[in-house]
Image (cartoon, grey):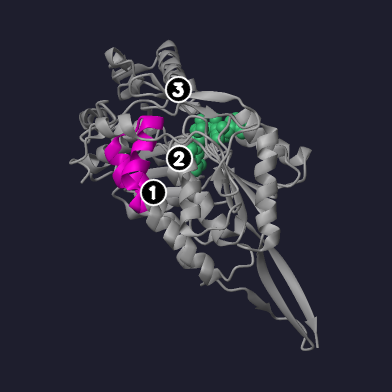
Amino acid sequence: MLQEIDWHARAKAVALPNRPFIDGQYVDSLSGETFACIYPGDGRPLTDVASCNAADVDVAVRSARKAFEAGVWSRMAPADRRRILLRFSELILANREELALLETLNVGKPIANAYNGDVVSAAACIAWYAEAIDKVYGEVAATAYDMTTLVMREPLGIVAAVVPWNYPMSMAAWKLGPALATGNSVILKPAEQSPFTALKFGELAIEAGMPPGVLNVVPGLGHIAGKALGLHMDVDCVGFTGSTEVGKYFMQYSGQSNIKRIGLELGGKSPQVVLADCDDLDAAAAGIAAGIFANTGQVCNAGSRLIVDEKIHDQLLEKIAAQAKVFAPGDPLDTATRMGSMVSEEQMDRVLGYIDAGRADGARPVIGGGRVKTETGGFYIEPTIFEGVRNDMKIAQEEIFGPVLSAIPVKGFDEAMATANDTVYGLAGAVWTGSVKNAHRAAKSLRAGVVWVNCFDRGSLAVPFGGFKQSGFGRDKSLHAMDKYTDLKAVWFAH
Ligand code: NAD
């Protein structure tokens, strides 16, 4: 199916949603302002999108509050919410071509990834929480004989989901699934780089039977629409995925307003530790290349620091460089492309700045190191591997969010672990080893919310995802995510 579609022709004809979706319909923004959406594959403008301001956000919050207080969703039997969410998931899949295309046009990711990965995983996430919601139970606490004491979970009310552009549909679904399933009304604020699929989700939710106001979508700029949600006195919770810098703003917004709950899935600088006893360097090389070049390295848990024992350093780098060839940047609308463009010119320039900083600090590019495909007008960077990196260099400490791997040589297990943990981040980490003992020791030593042993980037909706340290707190995915969007209530019945 994927290969049979003329994606370039479809791209010329597809309708691009560009107005806020509030109270069950597309509406004009009050701000009247817009921002431009550019296709990063060729640098050409696609359309102008409404830039919601604080007044628009307020309309969305009022609509969401009205729906919540009316109980049309919040008091609906979980089994009925389940039915509507399952229909929502089915509609996401039914609109797979259009959603995949909208995603690729917004962010320049390969159409095959959007079609086979992003759409499918977003639909699966909504379905997982739909299936879960009528199978979770409260508690009866062991209190005095003349009391019956229930411990229940209740929805918080209005949840703002503020999400990034790297996996727009999945990141939205990770918030929408648990927040909607538990009965909240949600206002989704997509990143300004990627508003299309979020807006389409609003439309599909209504088609699935979700009452108006339960899911509103406000496109807008972070420091305007995002900030307005963070400071709004009637938003009860923000589920945020994005940079650590902006995550810190949300903590401040909460303190400056109504102490709204904040869940933060933030940045990372994940170590790929390869010990001298690694018994499958080919598997490690393949995992490490995919772990930094997939999605153009624009991945929160990208394995961007290679911490490798000096005994196997040269051999491993040669193998990773060979694997990197698969990720030569190509036309995002070509179904054979494995790596597309960067999301924007700004992001490309940011990554090129880091590459310059790496060279200036004395690290040496083994492969890559520059912009390519300039003739297209698009924003492409080739896979880049730096050797001779010290862990105190900028390219080893700061999140680059691009296809740049920094190789840091170390001696032995203890130095490997100390180097891996010498970062402000703690989202994820991996160890490649043939020793069971070292595998267990490393899994306990790495200060990260996710540890992979002899694999990388494996995930499941059944498993929580999120970070330690400045990579945030709270978890997406799994039943644990529902805790973020609910409050505990204890009820004491005297007999
Ligand atoms: P970002 O922090 O710039 O933006 C994220 C969202 O916040 C966007 O919707 C944006 O409009 C909004 N925003 C920006 N400035 C704001 C402000 N001043 N006030 C309120 N809202 C504001 O992040 P990004 O560039 O879109 O995404 C990349 C970042 O996301 C990386 O740091 C990456 O690691 C992180 N990320 C983390 C995870 C995770 O699960 N931990 C997953 C994906 C991405």
Q: Which residues are magenta?
A: 93-119
Earlier-in-chain disc, 2 versus 3: 2
Q: Position of residue 375 (x, y in %)?
A: 27, 12
Q: Nearer the viewer, mark 2 or mark 3?
A: 2
| Nearest the eye: 198 or 244 | 198
| Nearest the eye: 176 or 260 | 176
Q: Position of residue 153 (x, y in %)?
A: 65, 66
Q: Which dot marks residue 440?
A: none
Query: Disc 3 marks which amino acid?
Result: Gln
Q: Quadrant of residue 457?
A: top left
- Ligand 1 is located in which of the four quadrants? top right
Q: Position of residue 147 (x, y in %)?
A: 78, 84
Apparent side of residue 60 relative to residue 82 in the rendered image (left or right): right
Q: Which dot marks residue 168?
A: 2
* Residue at which label 3 appears: 347
Residue 422 visible from this viewpoint? no
Counting other residues with Cα less than 10 Å from the Cα at mark 3, is it few (<14), some (14-19), or many (20 or more)?
Answer: some
| Nearest the eye: 307 or 60 | 60
Q: Is mark 3 within 8 Å of ligand 1?
A: yes
Query: Disc 2 marks which amino acid?
Result: Pro
Query: Disc 1 marks which amino acid?
Result: Trp
Counting other residues with Cα less than 10 Å from the Cα at mark 2, is it few (<14), some (14-19), or many (20 or more)?
Answer: many
Q: Quadrant of the C terminus?
A: bottom right
